[in-house]
Image: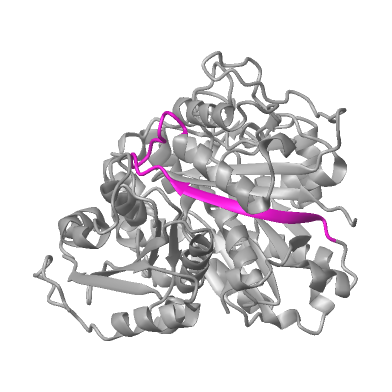
């Protein structure tokens, strides 16, 4: 059936899970981010291996071989999300779909293969995450492995939303996964994208990004289905906007035109006006070019409307690549739930070129409660995404 | 009514993924240039499905990095370690500024491989048509490694009466019927 020929179902989040460098659960991560903590530090093994950049945000204690680290992270996050949703106890628990985004899949497996280890790399790509989650939860619905680099988490949530609206799945497990990648450390550092010190989103003195890792998963379902089984929605997924810069292999369009187009598309999909947006979780990698372009896009989108609260988490968590936007969407859901915009670790001085200030402390809006947040995520290749999430309100 | 045109080419396997794709981009141009550019941009969605995009480049990149030293490795090939590099390259070459998606999947079951892009395509074509907006999209399937390295692209223009199943069946049938092309003929249409 054509989706546009029927009323679009409302899609809600009923479970979240995350494992990040700041916590082994979604709530632990949220609490650390609220305290303004950062996971960034220098790593001895990276020094020993001869990496030029040795500062990163990593998860210390993952009980898994390196080449299966990603699926271990995915499983931890998914179990937490499913547990919170209560889906595991429902009669249609197996009719779920799995939608996972990642940049490189099990990077360590590719590194081992390059060193001569005999591996079937088809078992270690992005689809290995969706396949392993489907197997772990005995899910028989659609499986999608979405390889849209640093924006992949947003895309996966959007893909799940579409599948639910089209009736292809009764519920969905969706999110992003990225195990720590030495290959990415080399690629980004040799591309001069890494920070000299800490990551400072939107700050005048920003010098680049820090690499992170982790996984975040969501249980998504149609609102009517969630309410019918007595589930408590945590937030509503309003819409996903996408665009392409078609500009440069790695750099964004300097004018932010493509980013603005994705944000505008997300608002249109969610039937939200710019003046109704309370908070934007910025992509905020801390690189000169990306933050400047995003700032221009935000200034253009909200011209004539109040600038929403802006926050970014990559100073705290690093850039988790394909997991980043899913992890940040978890923070968005927590913020909507608690009515708090988190601090932006690393943001001190406004860049006059951007002219936008991010939160420096946890912020509780006074004019009106948080109702709408937009989660920005952009990627190599000029991919732009914006995901609108709304606070769940029973009325 | 929904219409489709497609082109298919063998890909060179002696070259890098980037070189292999670059070699056939001009041959694919007729499929993209049917949609006019406005202000240097083409409005449409670009959906790529592949079973191995980025795999060969990733292994080669790390092998080269280990050989010269991690601190001095050349970053040139790094963007092509990412599976979305082909989609981004096609978008850049033809100025496509709409949604840009890449799925990694096995082609062992062609219908299953095209499930996701077909569902997405159906929504794109139908919702754009309903709003009286141009509804154009391209789907590209790529397999880089030998044997059978090839690319096939479809250009879709739609209205609101299309189903994901029919879209999927057309693409799966086209892809499954091609067999192994002549790897030396990088610019020769297979069909």
Please check the rendered image and state whether residue A45 is part of the magenta-colored stretch, yes or no. no
Along the horizontal axis of the image, is A333 left or right of A203?
right
- Residue at image coords 58%, 79%: A1
Where residue A253 sits, quadrant-wise, is: top left
Which residue is located at x 26 percent, y 86 percent?
B177
Q: Is residue B33 above or below residue B79?
A: below
Q: In the rendered structure, which segment of residues is drawn in magenta?
A: A233-256
Q: Give the residue displayed 51% in from the left and 47% down from the top.
A: A150
> What percent of the width, then of the height, locates residue B129?
48, 63
Q: Quadrant of residue A163?
A: bottom right
Please give left or right for residue A172 compared with residue B78 in the image. Answer: right
Q: Is the image coloured rainbow, by chain, by secondary structure, or in one colour?
A: one colour
In the displayed structure, does residue A64 sit left or right of residue A27?
Answer: left
Q: Name which residue lies at 64% across and 24% down.
A: A346
Look at the image and say whether residue A253 sits in the magenta stretch.
yes
Instruction: Give above or below for A153 relative to B138.
Output: above
The quarter of the rendered structure image containing the C terminus of chain A is bottom right
Residue A115 visible (yes or no):
no
x, y percent for residue A309:
72, 30
Camera sees residue B118: yes
Q: Position of residue A63 (x, y in %)?
A: 65, 60
Observer-nearest residue: A15 or A162? A162
Residue A202 is left or right of residue B176, and the answer is right
Question: Looking at the image, is B104 positioned above or below residue A21?
Answer: below
Where is residue B159 shown, x and y percent of the image? 45, 70
Quarter location, residue A100: bottom right
């Amino acid at each position: 059936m054509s989706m546009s020929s029927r009323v679009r179902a409302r899609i809600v989040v009923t479970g979240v899970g995350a494992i990040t460098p700041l916590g082994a659960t979604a709530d632990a991560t949220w609490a650390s981010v609220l305290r303004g903590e950062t996971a960034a530090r220098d790593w001895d093994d990276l020094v020993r291996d001869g990496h030029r950049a040795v500062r990163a945000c990593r998860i210390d204690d993952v009980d898994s071989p390196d080449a299966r680290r990603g699926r271990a992270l995915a499983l931890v996050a998914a179990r937490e999300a499913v547990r919170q949703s209560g889906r595991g106890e429902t009669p249609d628990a197996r009719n779920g779909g799995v939608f996972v985004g990642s940049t490189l899949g099990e990077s360590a497996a590719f590194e081992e293969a390059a060193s001569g280890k005999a591996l079937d790399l088809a078992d270690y790509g992005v689809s290995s995450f969706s396949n392993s989650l489907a197997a772990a939860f005995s899910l028989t619905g659609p499986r999608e492995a979405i390889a849209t680099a640093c924006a992949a988490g947003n895309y996966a949530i959007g893909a799940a939303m579409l599948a639910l609206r089209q009736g292809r799945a009764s519920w969905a497990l969706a999110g992003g996964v990225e195990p720590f990648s030495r290959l990415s450390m080399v690629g980004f550092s040799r591309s001069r994208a890494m920070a000299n010190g800490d990551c400072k989103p939107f700050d005048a003195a920003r010098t680049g990004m820090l690499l992170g890792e982790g996984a975040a998963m969501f249980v998504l379902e149609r609102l009517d289905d969630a309410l019918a089984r007595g589930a408590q929605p945590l937030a509503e997924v309003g819409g996903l906007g996408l665009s392409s810069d078609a500009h440069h292999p790695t750099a964004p369009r300097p004018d932010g035109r493509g980013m603005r187009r994705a944000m505008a598309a997300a608002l249109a999909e969610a039937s939200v006006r710019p003046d109704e947006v309370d908070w934007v979780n910025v992509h905020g990698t801390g690189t000169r070019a990306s933050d400047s372009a995003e700032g221009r896009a935000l200034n253009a989108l909200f011209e004539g409307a109040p600038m929403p609260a802006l926050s970014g988490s990559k100073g705290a968590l690093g850039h988790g690549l394909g997991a980043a936007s899913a992890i940040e969407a978890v923070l968005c859901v927590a913020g909507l739930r608690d009515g708090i915009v988190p601090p932006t670790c690393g943001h001190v001085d406004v860049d006059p070129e951007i002219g936008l200030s991010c939160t420096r402390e946890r912020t509780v809006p006074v004019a009106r409660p948080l109702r709408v947040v937009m989660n920005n995520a952009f990627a190599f290749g000029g991919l732009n995404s914006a995901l609108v999430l709304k606070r769940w309100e029973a009325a | 009514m929904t219409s489709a045109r497609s082109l298919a080419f063998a890909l060179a396997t002696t070259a890098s993924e980037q070189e292999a794709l670059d070699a056939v981009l001009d041959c694919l141009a007729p499929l993209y240039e049917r949609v006019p550019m406005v202000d240097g941009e083409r409005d449409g969605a670009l959906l790529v499905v592949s079973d191995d995009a980025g795999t060969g480049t990733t292994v080669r990149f790390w092998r080269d990095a280990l050989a010269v030293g991690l601190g001095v490795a050349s970053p040139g090939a790094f963007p092509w370690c990412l599976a979305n590099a082909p989609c981004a390259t096609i978008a850049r070459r033809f100025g496509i500024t709409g949604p840009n998606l890449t799925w990694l999947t096995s082609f062992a079951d062609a219908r299953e491989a095209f499930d996701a892009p077909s569902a997405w395509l159906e929504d794109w074509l139908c919702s754009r048509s309903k709003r009286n907006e141009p509804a154009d999209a391209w789907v590209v399937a790529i397999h880089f490694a030998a044997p059978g390295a090839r690319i096939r692209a479809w250009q879709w223009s739609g209205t609101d009466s299309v189903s994901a199943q029919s879209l999927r069946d057309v693409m799966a049938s086209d892809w499954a019927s091609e067999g192994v092309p002549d790897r030396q003929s990088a610019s020769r249409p297979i069909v």
